[in-house]
Amino acid sequence: MRLLSLLGLLTIMLLSACSSQNSSQEFSTVTEQKWSEVEADAEDTTVRMFMWGGDEGINQYIDDWVTPNLKEKHNVTLERIPMDTGEILQKLQTEKQAGKQDGTIDIIWINGENFKNAKENKLLAGSFTSNLPNFNEFYQTDDPAFQTDFGTPVEGMEAPWGKVQFVFHYESEKIETPPASFEELKGWVQENPGKFTYPNADDFTGNAFLRHILYASADTPSDIYDSPLDEGSISETAEETWNYLNEMEPELWRSGEHYPNTLTELDRLYSQGEVWMTMGYNEARAESLINDGVFPETTRSFVMEPGSIGNTHFLSIPFNSTNPAGALTAINFMLSPEAQLAKLKPNYWGENTPISIDKLPKEMKEEFQSVDRGQSVLSQQKLEDSFLPESEAAYVDWMKEQWFDEVVQN
């Protein structure tokens, strides 16, 4: 019986390995086709895009602009399925372990540590960006921002969809001059007790806020973003970071006894006037919230010295997509100048674009340059001058663990 069980287990493992190999071969077969053949195979198919669904402006952009235009231009039906990225990867990991090659996900919105985990666990289909006509025609393909993702080599396994920069939003009727540095922020918090807080380290935005403090505590930010995580070499910088946060904590909202679990919770506190600042990636995200009456019309944004962390986010294809041709067609469409222009406009998403404006035709270039992103959005020059790259993904998990030990439990 034991021998039979062992043989059965070996058979399952071999079948799983063969299935995985067949899936890889099938994807490479698709990427070896002419682009016209890829688009032809995609016609009259459905593409299921799994993505974070916590922003209504983003959801509206997908549902009201991308979906109908993709259908009209390519006869491809896009289904948006909201799910946190960590849950998406867990689903893929479970399917991989079970040898399931007929997956339910065709496109993933991904970056950072999630991309690193997906790549290391072989949850992605493979390299494909060199096949995308729009990427090759309208993007600076050798841009370092497209070559690595939080320190992880991309190797063509994800396509740049957008880029964002971290900014702070404030109520300009209550704050005449926002802080210019993180040291000034601490002083402002102490002078205005209860009017500032930040999401906890498990939240993507809260974790980024903490990494800004780490950058500011270093001799130069490049000491962090240019270096792999080495706890020994950054021990002094880390100690300064925890001291800063602990000194500020008593004057935070609710005296630091509770940190918002999500950016949505912090935004609600801001919209209700309990705190006078909020924050987040995407320098233009406040515009849709102002237009919807969620944020006050007097909301403005600012960045502080030593700078503002920015990153690129991507679209990728999982290892067991059953419609790789449809996924490639949809991603190529979402990288098109038309789709990127609609995404840049504040009536939907208002997010900045990774497209190379210089590579666009004259009329399209003028359309991009004429977009009014809104009063709450900092100038492009200010954003570029303050830009700081992301550190490697390992800092994210390290920050989660250390913040709970050094600040919450302290």
Image: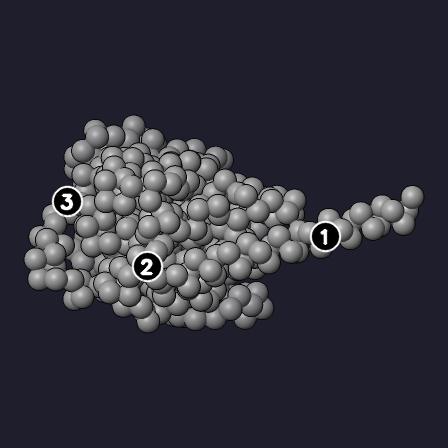
Residue at 38 percent across and 41 percent down: it is 45
Residue at 29 percent across and 28 percent down: it is 272
Q: Residue furthest right?
A: 1
Looking at the picture, does residue 219 appear above or below residue 291?
A: below
Residues at marks 2 and 3 touching, judged by CB atoms closer than 8 Å: no
Helix, strand or loop under label 1: helix
- Mark 2 Cα-neighbour bin, 10 Å: few <14, some 14–19, many ≥20: some
Task: Name the front one of labels 2 and 3.
Answer: 2
- Of the numbered discs 2 and 3, the one sitting upstream in the chain is 2
* Quadrant location, the N terminus: top right
Left or right of 221 in this view: 175: left
Residue 94 image position (x, y, % from top left): 61, 43
Residue 361 image position (x, y, % from top left): 12, 62
Q: Measure the C-alpha gap from mark 2 to mark 3.
A: 38 Å
Q: Residue 374 shows which numbered tag?
A: 3
Q: Residue 35 shows which numbered tag?
A: 2
Residue type, numbered disc 2: Trp
Residues at marks 1 and 3 touching, judged by CB atoms closer than 8 Å: no
Q: Is residue 209 visible?
A: no
Q: Measure the C-alpha gap from mark 2 to mark 1.
A: 35 Å
Residue 353 image position (x, y, % from top left): 25, 55
Q: Quadrant of residue 336?
A: bottom left
Q: Nearer the viewer, residue 151 or 13?
A: 13
Q: Is residue 316 visible?
A: yes
Q: Measure the C-alpha gap from mark 1 to mark 3.
A: 56 Å
What residue is shown with label 1? Answer: 13
